[in-house]
Amino acid sequence: LLALLAVLALVPAPTRASPPTRHDLWSVFQLALHNDPAYREALETARAQGEVTDIARGALLPAVSLSAHLSQTNQSGSTLQTAPLQNKFFTYSANDASNVRDAGYAATLTQTLFNWAAWAGLSQANAEAAEARATLASTIQSILLTVAQGYFNVLYADDLLAAQRAARVADGELLALAKEEYRVGLQPITNERQAKASYDLARAGELAARLQRETALQALASVVGRPLTHLAPLVHHLPLLPPQPNDLSRWIDGALADNPSLLAAHDAVRAARENIGVVAARGLPNLSLLLSHQRNDSNGTQAYSSVVSSSESPDVFHGNVNLLELNLSWPIYTGGEVSASVSQARAQYRAQSATTEATRRSVVQQTHDDYLTVLSDIAQVRAYRSSVRASRTALKATQEGYKVGTQTITDVLTARQNLLTAEENYAQSRYNYLEALLSLKADAGRLTPASLLALNRYLRP
């Protein structure tokens, strides 16, 4: 999943200069992937934590250093000296000077032989890196769900707006008919007033649906980082497939094995357990080996002059130093700091273990609920689809009855409202089914970008 998302991140996002006529679910997800800050944060956190592993490993590998120096020293000075001469003392000045060039280098290799804190730190870093990768996978699933839910919210708002618009048009036609019937004396004014009230409600409903659509579009734009207007709608005949496999226990087993949030929690427990070893190792001895080679060359002269005597001698040195050294350090007593830190680390480990158990139970409960929700939504989609058909038939029969005088305008308005309610419920149930199916896949750690790509088959171009 990480590799796939890394490749997808390199795919250039559509530009504003040439936007597609209509966005589908896959293109919207790509936009979110390029612009969602939560994904970027999780991705960079995983990358940074991967470097921590290399840093921890570096404490166990050989360290080689090289140093060199070059210096030129010119020094001069004078002193006053006293010497006896013919039973007397006289004072004279003595001058000395030096001119020395010094050059050399040193190469040092240090190798850890025993450092339990470094070994435990490497294990802890590996656990933290695995936790970061699992957190990234969980974040990606959250983005997938957020994109799908936002996309379906817009489609539902589109369906709702279309239904409200159709109701407003139909109520407008009925209002015009009621006015004409009242004008010619065929119906009382109450019919016109009922039709007018229904028409006003339909206009208000259409306006509310339009505002709901704008709100849904704005919410989706906040995820993808740019405004969207035209989205590919869902096909009329959506296949209602049960979860595969159609076995709740297998979904729960899959969630316990692959749910990224639960995996991240397990890795956090492992990191907390390794931290106990890191802290306890502060009271253990450390042993390291040092190999060093040093070379030093010095060339120059030393000069001395006075009224008594003078001299000049070379100052030359060429030498090599090879060093083999074992270093042992053992903090035998640290004032109780180590034991207190170990107790703290153990408490943190127990706390993280409790958090992981709570996460495990939550994952099992969520998987159980989402599995049953998918099955329930399938039944609801079928039931509401039948309800729409029945409501349309009832409306048509009521309209025919109104024409021949066996039904009232109230019956027609009621039948149309029943159809509007059934259409809204049917549209909502279809999107609820798809969202529950995606949530179930997320519970089991099976929600991937390919899941959205597969849903694109059910969108009309």
Image (cartoon, rainbow, N blue to C red):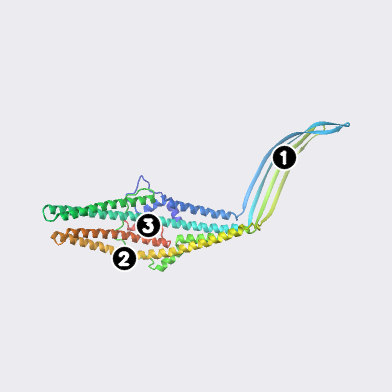
Ranked by sequence position, the earlier of labels 3 and 2 is 2
Ranked by sequence position, the earlier of labels 3 and 1 is 1
The residue where tag 1 is placed is: 299
Left or right: where 11 falls relative to 278: left
The residue where tag 3 is placed is: 453
- Toward the viewer: 290 or 177? 177
Callout 3 amino acid: Leu
Element under disc 1: strand
Contact, mark 1 vs mark 2 (Cβ under 8 Å): no
Q: Where is residue 102 in the image (x, y as percent from the top left)?
A: 69, 41
Label placed on residue 379: 2
Give the image quarter of residue 148. bottom left
- Toward the viewer: 98 or 201? 201
Ranked by sequence position, the earlier of labels 1 and 2 is 1
Which quadrant of the figure contains the N terminus? bottom left
The residue at the point 31 percent across, 59 percent down is 428
Callout 1 amino acid: Asn
Q: Where is residue 347 in the image (x, y as percent from the top left)?
A: 54, 61
* Front tag of 3 and 1: 3
Q: Where is residue 133 in the image (x, y as percent from the top left)?
A: 48, 57
Neighbour tally class for label 3: few under 14, some 14-19, many 20 plus, Cα within 10 Å: some
Camera sees residue 1: no
Whole-angstrom CA distance, mark 1 to mark 2, is 97 Å
Which quadrant of the figure contains the C terminus? bottom left
Neighbour tally class for label 1: few under 14, some 14-19, many 20 plus, Cα within 10 Å: some
Element under disc 3: helix
Camera sees residue 380: yes
